[in-house]
Image (spheres, helix red, strand yellow):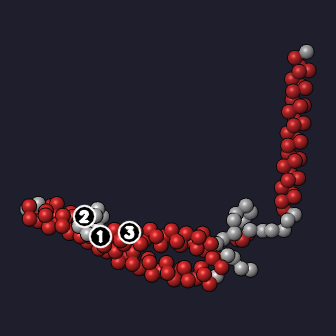
Amino acid sequence: MYVRRRTRTLLAGLAVTAVLAGTAGAASAADDTTGAKPAGGTTGAKPAGDGARALCKRVPKIDRRIERALKRLDAGAGTRGSVARLEKRVDNAKKAGHTEIATYLQNRLDFRKSLRTSLEQRQKDLTAVKTWCQANGNGKATG
């Protein structure tokens, strides 16, 4: 009696496996008949791209972020993150005779000044990207 139950369970399991394998094979064959092959010859991979469409979409946000950072750097001594505030802190540390603190803050100040030039360069590059995006349909692929 137990032998029949095991046999029936085994046969039912094999039947389900066969049905699933046949369905999966038919589905993969249907996908292959479209004739569309991804770039690079690999299966299942997306076509290679430079992300132009995504970058063109994000240009306004990136521009606002750079503007906000430059505005903060140029703000007065009362604004956190400004160059003027950090210069004031360096001067206060030197007056108090805290040379290690002054050195640390001076290094931060040097970096912050270099950050300003880096952000200005990014702003110029972003202007060129914005011009390119407008001329090329916001990065939509042509072909």
User: Residue 82 falls in which quadrant of the image?
Assistant: bottom left
Q: Nearer the viewer, residue 2 or 44?
A: 44
Question: Which amino acid lies under the numbered mark 3 shown in the image of this protein?
Answer: Ala
Dot 2 corresponds to which residue? Answer: 78
If the image is split into quadrants, where does the C terminus sit?
bottom right
**Outermost residue toward the top in this view:** 1
Dot 3 corresponds to which residue? Answer: 69
Dot 1 corresponds to which residue? Answer: 75
Q: CA distance from mark 1 to mark 3?
A: 10 Å
Question: Which amino acid lies under the numbered mark 2 shown in the image of this protein?
Answer: Gly
User: Which residue is drawn at the image coordinates 87% and 57% (left, top)?
Assistant: 29
User: Which residue is drawn at the image coordinates 23% and 67% (left, top)?
Assistant: 77
Of the image marks 2 and 3, the number of the one nearer the N terminus: 3
Image location (x, y in percent) of residue 31: 83, 59
Between circles 1 and 3, the one closer to the viewer is 1
Of the image marks 1 and 3, the number of the one nearer the N terminus: 3
User: Which residue is drawn at the image coordinates 46% and 70% (left, top)?
Assistant: 64
| Labels 2 and 1 touching (C-beta < 8 A) | yes
If the image is split into quadrants, where does the N terminus sit?
top right
Local SS, label 2: loop
- Asked if one can make out residue 45 in the rendered structure from this viewpoint, the answer is yes
